Every structure is written in structure tokens, then in C-alpha cells.
Image (tube, rainbow, N blue to C red):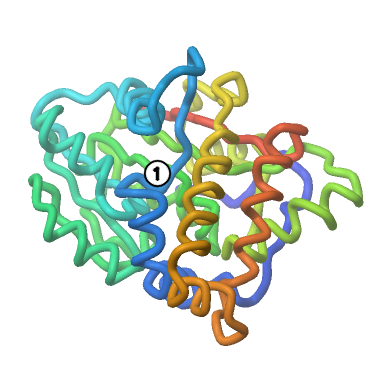
Amino acid sequence: MWSSSYSGGMPVSGTAGSDEVSVAGHYDALDRFYREIWGEHVHHGLWSGGNESVAQATRALIDRVTGWAALEPGATVADAGCGYGGTSRVLATEHGCSVTGYTLSAAQAAWARERGGGPEYEVRSWLKNGREAGGTDAVIAIESLSHMVDKPRAFGEAARVLAPGGRLVLVDWLGCERPSVLQRRGLLGPIAREGRLPTLCTASEYEGYIRGAGLRLLHSEDLAPFSPQRTWGIVARRLGRRLATDGEARRYLLGSANPDRTFAFSLARIPLALRTGTMRLMLMAAERPS
């Protein structure tokens, strides 16, 4: 039985507009722009040598996750917060896994289904995933748990559905352990609000949630050496070109009627937070004991 106890400090809070309805609304409303600017992988890339293409860098993160998931052909995988299903398709087509992706966004699921590739997609909360207890070989969650309101329950659901020996592998945005008032007010708090993150936790809090859920922590890694902040420079340039050439996009994205227009500020805040260590992109792998 999972517990909500953890060993860190208080997480940075977002706003009341960071519940599941608002997260779904954010991704549905900006669906077209996410696909055009981010592509099918709405997550950071990892640059090992510095000369990788965007496709190579984003694939590097997927390969790191799948490596820690230790997947065999035929494995049953839940992709919690699958976005447009890019990672789910890699797992199904290249690793021979049976994959179900979960997203709050009907627009994301519709586009992912059109792409095909083998996975199934459900528009539902991971907190109410309805999966059979003990029947899943791996749960992956790439930059999605930070959107979830009840973090202990999210980890508890992973522990519940995993088979003995099954693994949870996550990548997520986390705050530094003891942020200053300036870091909280100038970076972490605004990032949480603009990114629809109900809370922005620390690595020690996530590790506590993992142990509280009855899972064994295998690996915890700060991905800073792979310069994930480069992703945001690329996104900012793509967005800048779009705004300069598309009047309709400019009017919608920057208009006062768009509740997500403040997310543009995070294009500057997030890379700064990553460079200064105020925010960390972490990979963690855990296992349900046999």
C-alpha cells in the first residue's frame, strides 16, 4: 500500500488553474502550435556531443528511458502522459511492446490515433487509469508527472499496476532542493503557473514518493550534462519565425483572449532555470520488488 510520506521540503505550488481540466484545455487549445513548433515529441532533447540534430537529441532521451525500462518484445507498457504518442510508437514498432498511452488531451489522442503504429490511446487521467493490478511490465512518464495534481497517487498507481519486477521510468522537471526566495518568485513559481504545473517538486520528494509507493529506486540522474535547455532555444526560434510570418497565429497566441499567452515567458525562464540549477531535468528508474 502506498504512502504519501516523503523526505523533501515543500513543493513550489502553481495555481488553481493547474487542474486536469485546465491542463487538457491548454494542450487542446494550443494543439496546432505544439505540433508545428515541437513536433510529435513534446519533450526535451539530450545533446551528448553538441552536433546532434533535434531528431537525434529527442531520440536520445527516448532511448535512455527505454534502456532503463529493460523492455523485452511483447512487454506490456503504459505511457502515462503520452502526448502525441511519439514514444509509444517507438516502443510498439521497434521494441515489439503492447503499449497504451494516456493523455488528458482529446486533440493529442486524435492525432496519435491517425498516425497508427500499434499503440492504443485513452483520453483519461493516469490517476484513474483503470488498469488491472499487477499486469503491466513498465510504466513510463516523460515530463508528465509534474502536471498531475496528486503526486503520491500518481506513483501509487504505477506501483499498483506494475507486475513484480516491473519498472517505472520517469523524466520530469524538478526544482532545486532549497530554492531562495528570488528563485521561487522569479523562476519556479511563474514556471509552475505558466506551465500548468500544480506543484513543482524536488528530486528528494520524488524519491520519497517512489519509496512511499513501495517501489525500489534503481537510478536517479540529473540530465544537465546533456544540455536539455538547448531545446528551448530551438522552440523559441521556431515560435519567433511563426509569429513573424503568420498574422493569425500572432493574433491568437498573443491576444488577451488567450489564457495561455503567458506561457511565452517560460521560453526565457525555463532555460535560465536549467542553466542556473534552479530547475533540474531528472531521470529516475524504480522497480516493483519481486
Give the amino acid type for the residue marked by disc 1 in the picture: Ala
Q: Position of residue 13 (x, y in %)?
A: 71, 61
Along the horizontal axis of the image, is 204 left or right of 216? Answer: right
Q: Position of residue 150 (x, y in %)?
A: 54, 61
In the displayed image of the protein, which residue is found farthest to the top?
49
Observer-nearest of 210 and 260:
260
Answer whether residue 189 is visible to the viewer in this image: yes
Seen in the picture, residue 223 relative to 181 is either above or below; the reply is above
In the displayed image of the protein, which residue is found farthest to the right?
181
Which residue shows up at 47% across the image and 74% down it?
247
Observer-nearest of 3 and 16:
16
Quadrant containing the C terminus in the rendered view:
top left
Q: Residues within 10 Å of mark 1 (few under 14, many from 20)?
A: many
Which residue shows up at 38% across the image and 23% down it?
64
Along the horizontal axis of the image, is 200 left or right of 244? Answer: right
Which residue shows up at 45% across the image and 51% down it?
144
In the displayed image of the protein, which residue is found farthest to the bottom?
257
Seen in the picture, residue 58 relative to 52 is either above or below; the reply is below
Q: Position of residue 79 (x, y in %)?
A: 29, 47
Q: Which residue is mark 1?
A: 141
Answer whether residue 20 is visible to the viewer in this image: no
Which residue shows up at 44% across the image and 29% down it?
286
Q: Position of residue 61 (x, y in %)?
A: 40, 29
Observer-nearest of 185 and 259:
259
Observer-nearest of 106 and 149:
106
| Residue 131 falls in image quadrant | bottom left
* Number of marks in the rendered image: 1
Q: Secondary structure at mark 1?
A: strand
Seen in the picture, residue 10 relative to 210 is either above or below; the reply is below
